[in-house]
Amino acid sequence: MGVPAFFRWLSRKYPSIIVHCVEEKGKECNGVRIPVDTTKPNPNEVEFDNLYLDMNGIIHPCTHPEDKPAPKNEDEMMVAIFEYIDRLFNIVRPRRVLYMAIDGVAPRAKMNQQRSRRFRASKEGVELVEEKSRVREEVIQKGGYLPPEEIKERFDSNCITPGTEFMDNLAHCLRYYVAERLTNDPGWKNIVVFLSDASVPGEGEHKIMDFIRRQRAQPNHDPNTHHCLCGADADLIMLGLATHEPNFTIIREEFKPNKPRPCGLCGQTGHEIKDCQGMPREKQGQHDEFANTMPSAEQEFIFIRLCVLREYLARELTMASLPFPFDFERSVDDWVFMCFFVGNDFLPHLPSLEISPFIRDYQSETRCLNGYLTQNGYVNLERVEMIMQAVGVAEDNIFKKRKEDEENFKRRNKEKRKRMKAEQQGPAYLTTGQFAPHALGRRDRPEAVQNARHQACDMRMQSNMVNAAQSLKAMMKNGGNSSAGPSDSADSRGVKRKADDSDSEPEPEDNVRLWEEGWKQRYYKNKFDVDATDEDFRRKVVQSYVEGLCWVLRYYYQGCASWKWYFPFHYAPFASDFKDIKDMFSDFEKDTKPFKPLEQLMGVFPAASGNFLPPTWRNLMSSPDSSIIDFYPDDFAIDLNGKKYAWQGVALLPFVDERRLRAALADVYPDLTPEEKRRNSLGSDVLFLGKSHPLFDFIHELYRTESNEDTEIPAELCHGIQGRLNLDDDPILPDNTVRSPVPMLRDISQNTAIGVKFKDPQYPDGFVFKAVLLPGAKIPSKVLKPEDWVRGNGQSWRPQLGFNPNRQQAHLDQSGFRALGYVHIYIFNIINVKTSKKKKKLFPFSHSPQSGKSGLLLGRLFTLPNRPRLVQKSVGVRTTVVQCCIPYSYMMRISVRIMEALYTPRIHLPRPQTHCQTGHSGGCCGWYNVHNGISRLFHTCYVCSL
């Protein structure tokens, strides 16, 4: 979703919605890998019924990962995708349905954003190649060394678009993968698998939502189905709330910022291409055995519990003394609707709106609205206008306050950088001997001064050396002028300070200046090239934006209202412009059809990606005689629009005229080959299941009788799932060999799976899916406690760990506390080190509270975050020492790790799931205070202890 940092804001505001996944790993015995038995209960202490995979969030990190070497070819990419799905299946362990949805042809409103992304990716790729060439030449001229350039074909991620050969191959590979798992994996034997590949129109997440919507409108639907949706987009949270299903969970990768990325020239970490100096590479390992490996850790997953988010929203949105009955489900729909104003994939965000103040305005104005803003995906524009006018009155103050906050933030950052710089530099010089600074409480005494004259002379000489070094540095900066008198300072008084000497980064030019008077006139003149007095144009922009709000909400709650509609501007209007909008929208055009896959490629691809298209189609992108050559500019402007980085800006690309595009393609359609015509056609979902499923015999009979008519699924055979079945053109049938499309994988000679086309239940035109809780739905038990809302009241704040509210808490008895005391003694013995003549500190690891644990304790110490470099040496039969210097701040962490080493193997506790008392989440600071006994002694997390 196009809301910048929306998930970060949500997880900080509502921290208890996050739960870390407990993942059971496979084992290896005598070189044979033993897979995880997914038929066993879920280790997360919750059982999921349905797992939905937004496949594009899986395809991209598997084909061009950022934290590990990329696959060498498509075969390795497919295997990586299979392994990723296996891992998710092992974590979630669905018991009824697995639904895999790949993005198909998107609505026109989404295609504009796809076009912008793909043109940006192409432009950034060209700029990256040019920058590499320029920096390489500069480094070599300066005498630096760079490894020779590798000549390898760059993977173009634009091929992950419907209609390409890559996506067609992916669909075949996933059919093979599903058949193999249904045949050989016991955990798959009772589930139904739906595959919606790129030939089925619609975005992946919205195909999933359409499936859920249509199933829950059936009379046989189980209202207490537990859904789990996998995807990284923030709009999945909105979509999950829009279903009004009480048991809905999202699983996604845990975001870890500041991951080290290797330089594109030298391959070393710690700098970017522009800062590369061509320095020699450090040896990796004792014999350089890790030279070609990237430091990476396996990505971990988190659950987002929407039932807990609903608890938070119930607390925030509940309003008393309303002139109409309060309906929590309707208020959730309004909350989702208000998030659209801040940003989404289909509309630019309003300049003056931020989510938290907007919700406060909504709550303050609700009593005057006499109702809610939305109902079942339809917008009440009269009430929306009242909210927007309330925001528009304060727009001027909003812009001024935002500017003030930005300046304060920059000032604090500048002061922080200065403090850190001063701390790193330290004093100019340190005296030694009797006059040297010493830590309080140390037992060793400084040596007395033997000759005071010699000591004073040494101090003066050291001071002169420092002053000489500073003078030399200043002379080099001044271009060789050694004088630093008043005349020099006077001459340089009017010289602008260089960027290298400045603590702040250059700010992009902002010609609008929303915090100054006349901001509306400047905005419309700079962004739209019209005067703000042009009321007709402003009303046209507002009307298009109002249509967009109605389209987006309908898309989320009822499905795609129009495949043709799109917002025809790059920028949004102001909140104060929303006047008289009640009659601006009536309805969308009926019976619109989506683009075909190759047509969409022509609408979103730049000319540089034309190799994925047929030759005559590709020629339309580059030929000067093409009637649509203006759709494919070689270069284009990016408006930062008040942002700092180019990826945050607005790509000023021309919008594609659908009529002109179709007219140009009409001349090249006859050139398509039969294979290209097949890839350019629209497909349907496919249902797979195994031989042990109750529905297997029913489907097998359809193939035996060669029934060509749509057949309804008996709901009692498939957990209440309904829809229509039809025979597949290229079916997977039992006892037929399934050929592997990946050479490194085996054929399935004894296949027991079966596949058939599937269509969702159909409803008459004008049918409205109700956005309500279904009858019989059971609300999950409350997770949040009263003290979750007020943390500063002195009460113990102990949030729920995981999904089980009745989890048995681990504790330490008296012997455990005695062992904890031994740990402290052990740590203090570590810190009380001996100093050799070479001033190296030796840390003995030969003794421990329990015998036989020294190796384990040393291994635990090696896993500390930001750990010091340890060099293990053997100096005797049973004595091992480590050369290093461990800061005092590590002591508390080491003691916790040692307690884990001693007690975790007995308790078998999962990874800590929640937050420390200062609010840090487990994902950001790694809170290890799970044991009751330890938590009484250590009330803060690692981040807080620093």
Image (cartoon, helix red, strand yellow):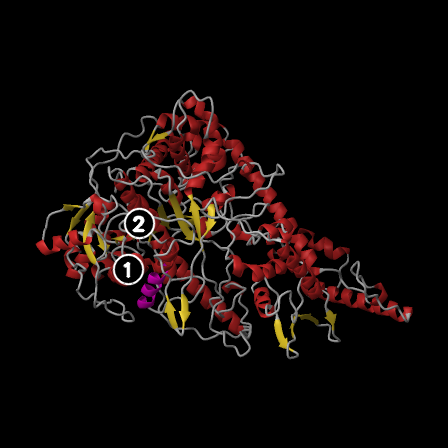
**Does the magenta run of residues contain 85?**
no
- Magenta-colored span: 74-84
Residue 727 seen by the camera: yes
- Disc 1, SS: helix
> Residue at 28% of width from left, 35% of height from top?
769
For residue 467, side relative to residue 541 (left or right): right
Residue carrying label 1: 610
- In the picture, the disc for residue 204 is 2
- Name, please, the residue furthest toward the top: 323
For residue 755, side relative to residue 803 (left or right): left
Q: Nearer the viewer, residue 594 or 401?
A: 594
Q: Amino acid at mark 2?
A: Gly
Task: State the image coordinates of residue 500 (x, y, percent, origin top left).
Answer: 61, 58
- Disc 2, SS: helix
Badge 1: residue crowd in 10 Å (few <14, some 14–19, many ≥20):
some
Q: Amino acid at mark 1?
A: Gly
Task: State the image coordinates of residue 739 (x, y, percent, origin top left).
Answer: 21, 67
Location of residue 107 (image quadrant): top left
Between circles 1 and 2, the one closer to the viewer is 2
